[in-house]
Image (cartoon, helix red, strand yellow):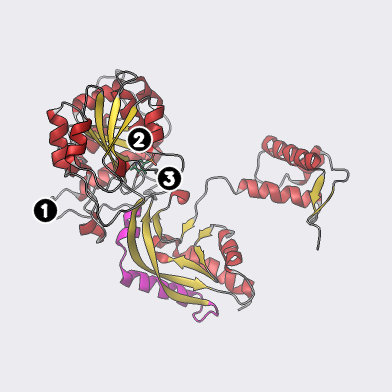
Amino acid sequence: MEATHKTIGPLPSVDQLIQQTRHLPIPRRLRKRLIQEQLQQWRDQQTLPAKGDISSLVEQGLCRFDQMRLRCVVNATGIVLHTNLGRAPLPLDLNSAIFQSLGYNNLELDLSTGKRGKRGLWVEKALATICQSPSSTVVNNCAAALMLILMAARRDAQSEVILSRGELVQIGGGFRIPEILESAGIRLREVGTTNHTTLEDYRRAIGDHTVMILKVHQSNFAMTGFVASPPLKALADLAREHDCPLVFDLGSGALVDTKEHFDIDREITPAEAIHQGVDLVCFSGDKLMGGPQAGIIAGNTTHINHLKQHPMFRALRIDKVTLGVLEQVAEHHLVSQDDPEHPETPSLPAYGGLSITMEVLEARTQCILESIGGNLNGVEQVDLSGGVGGGTMPTTALPSLGLGITSPDQPADRIADFFRNQPTPIIGHVSQKTFYLNLRTVLPEQDSLLIAALKAWKSHSGH
Ligand SMILES: *Cc1c(COP(=O)(O)O)cnc(C)c1O
């Protein structure tokens, strides 16, 4: 068997390697540090990879490092809100007010009085209008929103939050509801069972130390069969009776009727939850809202004001970049509802991936195939299915179309590598021997990138 490592010999100097890699777009000091770390690692291990000379190994390592910079990729996975790919794609209008306001702006200046102003008042009013709630505010993300709500509710070490056992969930990496409660210094009072929780279960649990009834959307999994939980309205009435706030972590936060607009499962909207009597809702800005990372909180004015006075609010606030994008996304939502009888789908890129029709997908796929000269061996149109993603609607499949690419002499992972290494990386998915490009999530203006990559593949694979 060929050895993959060889014993270390004399290594070139750091200065020499810095010189040899000066064509790379990495600032010198950063390059120096990376080179020093690499040389140190080889010295510690007393071995070198057997393949390639030292300069080219160093250069490869630097190039791999540079790939970690934030850059544009083509989402050909079919997953609309892909957490690895930045969740909701944002509207990219370079002439928009956001880009003009990145320098000095009126973030905390009241232009009508010239005095100090409060950040985010416009977006708070806009979000409250969208959620049909008395008040609203925004923090860093939905995890931060929930954390803030819990910390602000805590009275003392005995403070308890009531939560159904069916909602003791984990959302993505490291976000587990029981651990969040614990770190907020709040006791968890579990009620009901995994699949069945009744109003009576909640009623029996309410006591002197109860500071909140919490509901958490089971975003990323689904339960079927013998499943029950009390109607939200009944739970809200119970909470009111005991003067205890009801908080609903909605997670994905569908602001539009997802059945009507996209013909997919219906999610409760923040406005509906508030109408049913929930005191506070929170949801992510970058899931079904189609905006930037943010945690939106809406509901009762007293509660919202209380949150805004908590010291943690300052630590969790959003910056001017997020604020600018969020204002624009909120505006899209409001404008789309100008005629309440005929609400339109907000013109946001995330909704393009949800609302695109099979006819359009078919036409685009055909157009791509024609542009590459048709009939390419090992590239063919295939029926695919996509998903909403972002830990939302796990059972919803979105029918889709795209291309399946196979090669007689290369495994599908190699094909995936080839597409991922294009000037604009193209991210698809591999299943068995085929690499798939799912058109549903490819932004229409990026079809030309797919065409260029497919042509490159054609000459690379020699078909
Ligand atoms: C996604 C999700 C969160 C976390 O939202 P982030 O904005 O990513 O912090 C919290 N709760 C629920 C129910 C979620 O689905």
Q: Is residue 69 left or right of residue 210?
A: right
What is the x, y in percent for residue 130? 21, 41
Disc 1 is placed on an element classified as loop
The span from disc 2 to disc 1 (Cα, nearest Å) is: 30 Å
Q: Residues within 10 Å of mark 1 (few under 14, many from 20)?
A: few
Q: Nearer the viewer, residue 267 or 129?
A: 267
Q: Secondary structure at mark 3?
A: loop
Q: Amino acid at mark 3?
A: Gly
Asked whether the residues under the numbered discs 3 and 1 touch, taking CB atoms below 8 Å apart as contact, a structural biologist would say no
Which of label 3 and label 2 is nearer to you? 3
Corner quadrant of residue 42: top right
Q: Which residue is mark 1?
A: 341
Tell me if 112 is positioned left or right of 430 in this view. left
Q: Mark 2 sits on what residue?
A: 323
Residue denoted by label 3: 172
The residue at 20%/24% (across/down) is: 302
Q: Looking at the image, can residue 17 be seen? A: yes
Kindly tell me whether mark 3's CB lies below 8 Å from ligand 1: yes
User: Residue at (21%, 38%) from the top-left corner?
Assistant: 201
Q: Quadrant of residue 235?
A: top left
Residue 104, quarter of picture: top left
**Position in image of residue 439 (x %, y %):** 41, 65
> What are the residue bounds of the magenta stretch?
349-378
Image quadrant holding the C terminus, namely bottom right
Tag 1 or tag 2, which sits nearer the N-term? Answer: 2
Q: Is residue 244 placed above or below 90 in the rendered structure?
A: above
Q: Is residue 1 left or right of residue 421?
A: right
Query: How far is mark 3 from mark 1, CA to CA?
Result: 37 Å
CA gap between label 3 and label 2 equals: 25 Å
Q: Residue at x 48, y 77 (%)?
A: 380
User: Which amino acid lies under the numbered mark 1 shown in the image of this protein?
Assistant: Glu
